[in-house]
Amino acid sequence: MASRALTSIALSAVTLLGGCSAFRNYDSELAQTNQQLASGNVDAALTLLEKNNTSKDKDLLYYFEKGELLRAKGDLSGSQNAWSSADQVVGKWEDSVKLDTGKYLAQFGSFVVNDKVRRYEGYDYEKVMLTTQMALNLLAVNDFDGARMSIKKTHEREAVIADLRDKEYLKSEEEAEKEGVKTQYKDLQGYPVASLDAPEVVSLKNSYQSAFSHYLAGFVYEALGEKNLAAPGYRKAAELRPNTPLLEQALVNLDKPGGKNDDSDILIVVQSGLAPSRDSIRIPLPLPISNQLVITPLSFPIIKADTSTATLSQIGVDGQQLNLTQLNSTTAMSRRALRDDMPGIILRTTVRAVTKGVAQKQINETNPLAGLAVGISSAVLEGADTRTWRTLPDYTQVVRLRLKKGEHQVTLPSAVGGSVVKVTVDQRYQVISLRAVGNQVFASGLAAQVIPKANPTAVASLKP
Protein backbone atom coordinates (compact mmCIF):
# COMPACT_ATOMS: atom_id res chain seq x y z
CA MET A 1 0.00 0.00 0.00
CA ALA A 2 2.78 2.41 1.01
CA SER A 3 4.63 1.61 -2.22
CA ARG A 4 1.55 2.40 -4.30
CA ALA A 5 0.99 5.68 -2.47
CA LEU A 6 4.64 6.64 -2.87
CA THR A 7 4.50 5.92 -6.61
CA SER A 8 1.24 7.81 -6.99
CA ILE A 9 2.59 10.91 -5.26
CA ALA A 10 5.78 10.87 -7.29
CA LEU A 11 3.94 10.48 -10.60
CA SER A 12 1.39 13.16 -9.72
CA ALA A 13 4.13 15.64 -8.87
CA VAL A 14 6.06 14.96 -12.04
CA THR A 15 2.91 15.10 -14.21
CA LEU A 16 1.74 18.36 -12.66
CA LEU A 17 5.10 20.04 -13.06
CA GLY A 18 5.81 18.63 -16.48
CA GLY A 19 2.54 20.00 -17.79
CA CYS A 20 3.31 23.52 -16.68
CA SER A 21 4.22 25.85 -19.57
CA ALA A 22 6.90 27.45 -17.43
CA PHE A 23 8.98 24.29 -17.85
CA ARG A 24 9.00 24.16 -21.62
CA ASN A 25 12.38 23.45 -23.19
CA TYR A 26 12.72 26.84 -24.81
CA ASP A 27 16.26 26.32 -26.07
CA SER A 28 15.24 23.10 -27.85
CA GLU A 29 12.28 24.87 -29.48
CA LEU A 30 14.43 27.71 -30.77
CA ALA A 31 17.20 25.38 -31.94
CA GLN A 32 14.64 23.86 -34.33
CA THR A 33 13.35 27.29 -35.33
CA ASN A 34 16.86 28.54 -36.01
CA GLN A 35 17.64 25.44 -38.09
CA GLN A 36 14.89 26.52 -40.46
CA LEU A 37 16.14 30.11 -40.46
CA ALA A 38 19.69 28.99 -41.26
CA SER A 39 18.38 26.91 -44.17
CA GLY A 40 16.55 29.92 -45.58
CA ASN A 41 13.10 28.51 -44.80
CA VAL A 42 11.73 31.44 -42.83
CA ASP A 43 8.09 30.40 -43.29
CA ALA A 44 8.83 27.04 -41.62
CA ALA A 45 10.59 28.88 -38.79
CA LEU A 46 7.52 31.05 -38.28
CA THR A 47 5.25 27.99 -38.35
CA LEU A 48 7.33 26.38 -35.58
CA LEU A 49 7.20 29.56 -33.53
CA GLU A 50 3.40 29.66 -33.74
CA LYS A 51 3.13 25.92 -32.99
CA ASN A 52 5.14 26.38 -29.80
CA ASN A 53 3.18 29.44 -28.66
CA THR A 54 -0.49 28.50 -28.76
CA SER A 55 -1.54 30.45 -25.67
CA LYS A 56 -3.57 33.61 -26.27
CA ASP A 57 -1.40 35.37 -23.71
CA LYS A 58 1.79 35.70 -25.76
CA ASP A 59 4.96 36.46 -23.81
CA LEU A 60 7.79 38.87 -24.55
CA LEU A 61 10.00 36.22 -26.14
CA TYR A 62 7.34 35.36 -28.71
CA TYR A 63 7.27 38.96 -29.94
CA PHE A 64 11.08 39.20 -29.86
CA GLU A 65 11.49 36.10 -32.04
CA LYS A 66 8.58 36.83 -34.38
CA GLY A 67 9.85 40.32 -35.12
CA GLU A 68 13.30 39.03 -36.07
CA LEU A 69 11.94 36.20 -38.24
CA LEU A 70 9.58 38.53 -40.10
CA ARG A 71 12.46 40.93 -40.63
CA ALA A 72 14.49 38.13 -42.21
CA LYS A 73 11.51 37.35 -44.43
CA GLY A 74 11.39 40.96 -45.58
CA ASP A 75 8.05 41.71 -43.92
CA LEU A 76 9.15 44.91 -42.19
CA SER A 77 5.60 46.01 -41.37
CA GLY A 78 4.83 42.70 -39.65
CA SER A 79 8.19 42.78 -37.91
CA GLN A 80 7.57 46.28 -36.61
CA ASN A 81 4.11 45.29 -35.35
CA ALA A 82 5.53 42.32 -33.43
CA TRP A 83 8.29 44.44 -31.95
CA SER A 84 5.82 47.20 -31.06
CA SER A 85 3.98 44.60 -28.96
CA ALA A 86 7.28 43.67 -27.32
CA ASP A 87 8.03 47.36 -26.75
CA GLN A 88 4.70 47.78 -24.96
CA VAL A 89 5.62 44.91 -22.60
CA VAL A 90 9.00 46.49 -21.91
CA GLY A 91 7.30 49.86 -21.47
CA LYS A 92 5.09 48.42 -18.71
CA TRP A 93 8.23 47.06 -17.06
CA GLU A 94 9.78 50.54 -17.21
CA ASP A 95 6.65 52.08 -15.68
CA SER A 96 6.69 49.60 -12.78
CA VAL A 97 10.36 50.34 -12.12
CA LYS A 98 9.90 54.13 -12.23
CA LEU A 99 6.69 54.02 -10.16
CA ASP A 100 8.25 52.21 -7.20
CA THR A 101 11.80 50.90 -7.67
CA GLY A 102 11.96 49.54 -4.12
CA LYS A 103 8.80 47.48 -4.54
CA TYR A 104 9.99 46.11 -7.89
CA LEU A 105 13.36 45.08 -6.44
CA ALA A 106 11.64 43.39 -3.48
CA GLN A 107 9.46 41.32 -5.83
CA PHE A 108 12.26 40.45 -8.24
CA GLY A 109 14.71 39.63 -5.48
CA SER A 110 12.34 37.21 -3.77
CA PHE A 111 14.09 34.10 -2.43
CA VAL A 112 10.95 31.98 -2.74
CA VAL A 113 10.37 31.85 -6.50
CA ASN A 114 12.86 30.32 -8.92
CA ASP A 115 13.96 32.66 -11.71
CA LYS A 116 12.68 30.37 -14.46
CA VAL A 117 9.05 30.48 -13.27
CA ARG A 118 8.93 34.26 -13.28
CA ARG A 119 7.31 36.09 -16.17
CA TYR A 120 10.08 36.76 -18.66
CA GLU A 121 11.03 40.45 -18.62
CA GLY A 122 14.01 40.34 -20.98
CA TYR A 123 17.65 41.01 -20.28
CA ASP A 124 18.83 44.61 -20.33
CA TYR A 125 20.74 44.22 -23.60
CA GLU A 126 17.62 42.70 -25.21
CA LYS A 127 15.50 45.68 -24.19
CA VAL A 128 18.01 48.10 -25.71
CA MET A 129 18.63 46.04 -28.85
CA LEU A 130 14.86 45.89 -29.39
CA THR A 131 14.58 49.60 -30.12
CA THR A 132 17.85 49.50 -32.08
CA GLN A 133 16.48 46.76 -34.35
CA MET A 134 13.24 48.73 -34.71
CA ALA A 135 15.30 51.72 -35.83
CA LEU A 136 17.00 49.53 -38.47
CA ASN A 137 13.58 48.49 -39.79
CA LEU A 138 12.61 52.13 -40.21
CA LEU A 139 15.94 53.04 -41.82
CA ALA A 140 15.46 50.22 -44.33
CA VAL A 141 12.54 52.27 -45.73
CA ASN A 142 14.42 55.58 -45.31
CA ASP A 143 12.25 56.71 -42.38
CA PHE A 144 14.92 58.67 -40.51
CA ASP A 145 12.37 60.61 -38.44
CA GLY A 146 10.81 57.38 -37.20
CA ALA A 147 14.27 55.94 -36.47
CA ARG A 148 15.04 59.08 -34.45
CA MET A 149 12.07 58.30 -32.18
CA SER A 150 13.30 54.73 -31.60
CA ILE A 151 16.79 56.04 -30.84
CA LYS A 152 15.41 58.55 -28.33
CA LYS A 153 13.54 55.69 -26.64
CA THR A 154 16.79 53.68 -26.53
CA HIS A 155 18.54 56.48 -24.65
CA GLU A 156 15.67 56.86 -22.18
CA ARG A 157 15.59 53.10 -21.61
CA GLU A 158 19.31 53.01 -20.87
CA ALA A 159 18.82 55.67 -18.18
CA VAL A 160 16.06 53.63 -16.48
CA ILE A 161 18.21 50.49 -16.56
CA ALA A 162 21.29 52.28 -15.21
CA ASP A 163 19.41 53.66 -12.20
CA LEU A 164 17.72 50.31 -11.49
CA ARG A 165 20.90 48.23 -11.67
CA ASP A 166 22.83 50.55 -9.36
CA LYS A 167 20.14 50.06 -6.72
CA GLU A 168 19.76 46.34 -7.41
CA TYR A 169 23.46 45.51 -7.02
CA LEU A 170 23.64 47.52 -3.79
CA LYS A 171 20.59 45.72 -2.42
CA SER A 172 22.06 42.35 -3.42
CA GLU A 173 25.27 43.10 -1.52
CA GLU A 174 23.29 44.08 1.56
CA GLU A 175 21.12 40.93 1.38
CA ALA A 176 24.17 38.68 0.90
CA GLU A 177 25.78 40.14 4.01
CA LYS A 178 22.53 39.78 5.95
CA GLU A 179 22.09 36.12 4.89
CA GLY A 180 25.78 35.28 5.38
CA VAL A 181 26.25 34.17 1.76
CA LYS A 182 29.86 34.76 0.70
CA THR A 183 30.02 32.46 -2.33
CA GLN A 184 31.09 34.10 -5.60
CA TYR A 185 30.94 32.65 -9.11
CA LYS A 186 34.71 32.20 -8.99
CA ASP A 187 34.18 29.80 -6.06
CA LEU A 188 31.94 27.46 -8.06
CA GLN A 189 34.07 24.40 -8.81
CA GLY A 190 33.42 23.23 -12.36
CA TYR A 191 31.83 26.49 -13.48
CA PRO A 192 33.30 28.02 -16.71
CA VAL A 193 34.63 31.11 -14.92
CA ALA A 194 36.95 32.04 -17.81
CA SER A 195 33.97 32.74 -20.08
CA LEU A 196 32.75 35.49 -17.72
CA ASP A 197 36.23 36.88 -17.18
CA ALA A 198 37.22 37.01 -20.86
CA PRO A 199 38.75 40.37 -21.93
CA GLU A 200 35.89 41.14 -24.35
CA VAL A 201 33.45 40.70 -21.45
CA VAL A 202 35.32 42.54 -18.72
CA SER A 203 36.12 45.46 -21.06
CA LEU A 204 32.40 46.23 -21.49
CA LYS A 205 31.23 49.14 -19.36
CA ASN A 206 27.97 47.28 -18.72
CA SER A 207 25.76 44.70 -20.41
CA TYR A 208 23.31 46.97 -22.18
CA GLN A 209 25.07 49.92 -23.83
CA SER A 210 26.09 49.08 -27.39
CA ALA A 211 28.64 51.03 -29.43
CA PHE A 212 26.56 50.19 -32.48
CA SER A 213 23.37 51.67 -31.02
CA HIS A 214 25.12 54.94 -30.23
CA TYR A 215 26.97 55.08 -33.55
CA LEU A 216 23.68 54.50 -35.36
CA ALA A 217 22.19 57.33 -33.30
CA GLY A 218 25.02 59.60 -34.43
CA PHE A 219 24.48 58.65 -38.06
CA VAL A 220 20.74 59.32 -37.89
CA TYR A 221 21.18 62.69 -36.18
CA GLU A 222 23.84 63.64 -38.73
CA ALA A 223 21.55 62.66 -41.60
CA LEU A 224 18.80 64.87 -40.11
CA GLY A 225 21.22 67.80 -39.85
CA GLU A 226 21.39 67.68 -36.03
CA LYS A 227 25.17 67.67 -35.64
CA ASN A 228 24.93 68.84 -32.04
CA LEU A 229 23.19 65.54 -31.22
CA ALA A 230 25.28 63.42 -33.60
CA ALA A 231 28.51 64.31 -31.80
CA PRO A 232 27.44 62.85 -28.40
CA GLY A 233 26.31 59.68 -30.17
CA TYR A 234 29.66 59.19 -31.88
CA ARG A 235 31.52 60.19 -28.72
CA LYS A 236 29.63 57.65 -26.60
CA ALA A 237 30.26 54.92 -29.18
CA ALA A 238 33.99 55.71 -29.09
CA GLU A 239 33.91 55.59 -25.29
CA LEU A 240 32.24 52.17 -25.32
CA ARG A 241 34.62 50.81 -27.97
CA PRO A 242 37.89 52.78 -27.69
CA ASN A 243 40.65 52.77 -30.31
CA THR A 244 38.21 52.18 -33.16
CA PRO A 245 39.19 54.36 -36.15
CA LEU A 246 35.68 54.35 -37.66
CA LEU A 247 34.23 55.91 -34.50
CA GLU A 248 37.00 58.48 -34.13
CA GLN A 249 36.73 59.44 -37.79
CA ALA A 250 32.99 60.01 -37.48
CA LEU A 251 33.62 62.83 -35.02
CA VAL A 252 36.32 64.37 -37.19
CA ASN A 253 34.13 64.24 -40.30
CA LEU A 254 31.28 66.11 -38.59
CA ASP A 255 33.30 69.33 -38.92
CA LYS A 256 34.08 68.79 -42.60
CA PRO A 257 31.96 70.13 -45.46
CA GLY A 258 29.59 67.69 -47.20
CA GLY A 259 30.51 65.78 -50.35
CA LYS A 260 29.30 66.27 -53.89
CA ASN A 261 25.57 66.43 -54.45
CA ASP A 262 25.57 63.23 -56.50
CA ASP A 263 27.37 61.29 -53.74
CA SER A 264 25.58 59.49 -50.93
CA ASP A 265 26.78 58.69 -47.42
CA ILE A 266 26.11 54.97 -47.03
CA LEU A 267 26.20 52.85 -43.88
CA ILE A 268 26.19 49.12 -44.60
CA VAL A 269 25.20 47.10 -41.52
CA VAL A 270 26.03 43.39 -41.53
CA GLN A 271 24.52 41.37 -38.67
CA SER A 272 25.64 37.76 -38.48
CA GLY A 273 25.06 34.64 -36.41
CA LEU A 274 22.62 34.10 -33.57
CA ALA A 275 22.52 35.17 -29.95
CA PRO A 276 24.01 32.60 -27.56
CA SER A 277 21.86 30.08 -25.73
CA ARG A 278 21.69 29.61 -21.98
CA ASP A 279 22.15 26.22 -20.36
CA SER A 280 21.96 24.95 -16.79
CA ILE A 281 24.89 23.43 -14.92
CA ARG A 282 24.72 21.75 -11.50
CA ILE A 283 27.41 22.62 -8.97
CA PRO A 284 27.63 20.88 -5.55
CA LEU A 285 27.90 23.35 -2.67
CA PRO A 286 28.08 22.77 1.11
CA LEU A 287 25.02 24.40 2.69
CA PRO A 288 24.15 24.82 6.39
CA ILE A 289 20.89 22.87 6.78
CA SER A 290 19.58 22.22 10.32
CA ASN A 291 23.01 22.90 11.84
CA GLN A 292 24.75 20.51 9.46
CA LEU A 293 26.78 21.11 6.29
CA VAL A 294 25.01 19.24 3.53
CA ILE A 295 26.54 18.92 0.05
CA THR A 296 23.71 20.13 -2.20
CA PRO A 297 23.77 20.28 -6.02
CA LEU A 298 22.57 23.72 -7.17
CA SER A 299 21.84 24.86 -10.71
CA PHE A 300 23.41 27.93 -12.32
CA PRO A 301 23.12 29.36 -15.84
CA ILE A 302 25.97 29.28 -18.37
CA ILE A 303 26.30 30.92 -21.79
CA LYS A 304 26.86 28.78 -24.89
CA ALA A 305 28.00 30.71 -27.94
CA ASP A 306 26.37 30.08 -31.32
CA THR A 307 28.60 28.45 -33.95
CA SER A 308 26.20 28.45 -36.90
CA THR A 309 27.84 31.24 -38.84
CA ALA A 310 31.41 31.98 -39.89
CA THR A 311 32.98 35.20 -38.62
CA LEU A 312 33.13 37.84 -41.33
CA SER A 313 35.97 40.32 -41.82
CA GLN A 314 35.27 41.88 -45.23
CA ILE A 315 32.59 42.47 -47.82
CA GLY A 316 32.92 43.50 -51.44
CA VAL A 317 31.41 46.69 -52.85
CA ASP A 318 31.55 46.97 -56.64
CA GLY A 319 34.47 44.55 -56.66
CA GLN A 320 36.49 46.32 -53.96
CA GLN A 321 37.06 44.47 -50.68
CA LEU A 322 36.33 46.59 -47.61
CA ASN A 323 37.05 45.77 -43.98
CA LEU A 324 34.14 45.43 -41.57
CA THR A 325 34.29 47.12 -38.17
CA GLN A 326 32.67 45.19 -35.34
CA LEU A 327 30.58 47.38 -33.05
CA ASN A 328 28.56 44.84 -31.12
CA SER A 329 28.73 41.26 -29.81
CA THR A 330 25.55 39.88 -28.28
CA THR A 331 27.56 36.97 -26.85
CA ALA A 332 29.84 39.36 -24.96
CA MET A 333 26.86 41.42 -23.75
CA SER A 334 25.04 38.26 -22.63
CA ARG A 335 28.08 37.08 -20.68
CA ARG A 336 28.51 40.50 -19.11
CA ALA A 337 24.84 40.43 -18.07
CA LEU A 338 25.33 37.03 -16.45
CA ARG A 339 28.59 38.14 -14.82
CA ASP A 340 26.80 41.11 -13.22
CA ASP A 341 23.76 39.00 -12.24
CA MET A 342 25.65 36.07 -10.72
CA PRO A 343 25.92 37.49 -7.17
CA GLY A 344 22.13 37.85 -7.03
CA ILE A 345 21.57 34.44 -8.66
CA ILE A 346 23.90 32.74 -6.17
CA LEU A 347 22.22 34.53 -3.26
CA ARG A 348 18.67 33.63 -4.30
CA THR A 349 19.58 30.02 -5.20
CA THR A 350 21.48 29.43 -1.96
CA VAL A 351 18.87 30.92 0.37
CA ARG A 352 16.06 29.08 -1.41
CA ALA A 353 17.96 25.76 -1.20
CA VAL A 354 18.65 26.17 2.52
CA THR A 355 15.03 27.11 3.23
CA LYS A 356 13.69 24.15 1.25
CA GLY A 357 16.26 21.82 2.78
CA VAL A 358 15.15 22.69 6.30
CA ALA A 359 11.45 22.38 5.36
CA GLN A 360 11.99 19.02 3.64
CA LYS A 361 13.87 17.63 6.65
CA GLN A 362 10.97 18.57 8.90
CA ILE A 363 8.43 17.04 6.47
CA ASN A 364 10.47 13.85 6.15
CA GLU A 365 10.37 13.40 9.91
CA THR A 366 6.57 13.48 9.98
CA ASN A 367 5.51 12.31 6.48
CA PRO A 368 8.20 10.65 4.31
CA LEU A 369 5.85 10.37 1.31
CA ALA A 370 5.10 14.08 1.33
CA GLY A 371 8.84 14.68 1.70
CA LEU A 372 9.44 12.65 -1.45
CA ALA A 373 6.92 14.74 -3.41
CA VAL A 374 8.61 17.93 -2.21
CA GLY A 375 11.97 16.51 -3.25
CA ILE A 376 10.71 15.66 -6.74
CA SER A 377 9.15 19.09 -7.25
CA SER A 378 12.33 20.77 -6.00
CA ALA A 379 14.45 18.78 -8.46
CA VAL A 380 12.24 19.93 -11.35
CA LEU A 381 11.90 23.52 -10.17
CA GLU A 382 15.51 24.26 -9.39
CA GLY A 383 17.03 24.25 -12.87
CA ALA A 384 18.52 27.56 -14.01
CA ASP A 385 16.50 29.87 -16.23
CA THR A 386 17.57 29.21 -19.84
CA ARG A 387 15.18 31.54 -21.66
CA THR A 388 16.70 34.22 -23.89
CA TRP A 389 16.11 35.95 -27.25
CA ARG A 390 17.70 33.40 -29.59
CA THR A 391 17.07 34.84 -33.08
CA LEU A 392 18.77 38.12 -32.17
CA PRO A 393 21.92 38.58 -34.29
CA ASP A 394 25.26 38.06 -32.58
CA TYR A 395 27.81 40.28 -34.31
CA THR A 396 26.97 43.67 -35.74
CA GLN A 397 29.60 45.03 -38.12
CA VAL A 398 29.56 48.10 -40.35
CA VAL A 399 31.18 49.75 -43.34
CA ARG A 400 30.70 53.43 -44.07
CA LEU A 401 31.49 54.83 -47.50
CA ARG A 402 30.46 57.32 -50.15
CA LEU A 403 28.75 56.02 -53.29
CA LYS A 404 27.25 57.67 -56.33
CA LYS A 405 23.51 57.37 -56.74
CA GLY A 406 22.49 54.36 -58.80
CA GLU A 407 22.88 50.58 -58.59
CA HIS A 408 25.79 48.86 -56.86
CA GLN A 409 26.73 45.30 -55.93
CA VAL A 410 27.63 44.07 -52.47
CA THR A 411 29.20 40.61 -52.24
CA LEU A 412 29.57 38.53 -49.10
CA PRO A 413 32.28 35.90 -48.51
CA SER A 414 31.83 32.30 -49.62
CA ALA A 415 31.71 31.32 -45.93
CA VAL A 416 28.16 32.69 -45.86
CA GLY A 417 27.20 31.46 -49.31
CA GLY A 418 29.00 34.06 -51.43
CA SER A 419 25.75 35.95 -51.86
CA VAL A 420 25.47 38.99 -54.11
CA VAL A 421 23.18 41.83 -53.09
CA LYS A 422 21.96 44.48 -55.50
CA VAL A 423 21.82 47.86 -53.79
CA THR A 424 20.02 50.92 -55.10
CA VAL A 425 21.38 54.22 -53.78
CA ASP A 426 18.96 57.12 -54.13
CA GLN A 427 19.18 59.05 -50.86
CA ARG A 428 21.66 61.58 -49.47
CA TYR A 429 22.10 59.33 -46.40
CA GLN A 430 21.17 55.67 -46.52
CA VAL A 431 21.41 52.55 -44.34
CA ILE A 432 21.66 49.10 -45.95
CA SER A 433 20.99 46.21 -43.54
CA LEU A 434 22.09 42.64 -44.25
CA ARG A 435 21.70 39.53 -42.09
CA ALA A 436 23.78 36.33 -42.36
CA VAL A 437 22.81 33.07 -40.65
CA GLY A 438 24.53 29.81 -41.57
CA ASN A 439 25.25 30.32 -45.27
CA GLN A 440 22.07 32.30 -45.88
CA VAL A 441 21.98 36.06 -46.41
CA PHE A 442 18.82 38.10 -45.90
CA ALA A 443 18.17 41.66 -47.02
CA SER A 444 15.11 43.79 -46.42
CA GLY A 445 13.85 47.21 -47.30
CA LEU A 446 13.56 49.33 -50.40
CA ALA A 447 17.18 49.38 -51.51
CA ALA A 448 18.65 45.88 -51.07
CA GLN A 449 17.81 42.68 -52.90
CA VAL A 450 19.66 39.36 -52.67
CA ILE A 451 20.31 38.03 -56.18
CA PRO A 452 19.29 34.35 -56.42
CA LYS A 453 22.19 31.97 -57.03
CA ALA A 454 22.33 30.47 -60.52
CA ASN A 455 23.52 27.12 -59.17
CA PRO A 456 22.13 26.64 -55.66
CA THR A 457 24.44 24.66 -53.40
CA ALA A 458 23.60 22.43 -50.49
CA VAL A 459 22.60 24.40 -47.42
CA ALA A 460 24.28 23.65 -44.11
CA SER A 461 21.84 23.29 -41.24
CA LEU A 462 22.30 24.58 -37.73
CA LYS A 463 23.22 21.96 -35.16
CA PRO A 464 20.77 21.75 -32.24
Image (cartoon, helix red, strand yellow):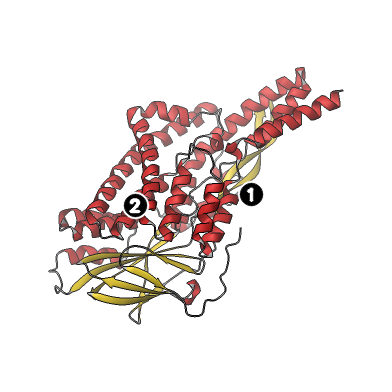
Q: Is residue 416 above or below residue 338?
A: below
Tell me: 447 left or right of 370: left
Verify CB contact (< 8 Å) between mark 1 and mark 2. no
- At a point 58% along the width and 30% down the height, the residue shown is 351
Quickly name the residue at label 1. Answer: 190
Residue to which mark 2 is pinned: 134
* Residue, far left: 257
Furthest residue to the top?
A: 366
Query: In the rendering, at what x and y percent does residue 156 appear?
Result: 28, 42
Local secondary structure at mark 1:
loop
Specify the amino acid type for callout 1: Gly
Choose between 338 and 272: the one closer to the eye. Answer: 272
Classify the position of the C terminus by image quarter: bottom right
* Res. 285 image quadrant: top right
Q: Toward the viewer: 93 or 445?
A: 445
Q: Looking at numbered disc 2 in the image, what kind of residue is underneath it? A: Met
Which one is closest to the eye, mark 1 or mark 2?
2
Residue 372's x, y, as percent? Answer: 75, 28
Query: Where 129 sits versus 141, above or below?
Result: above
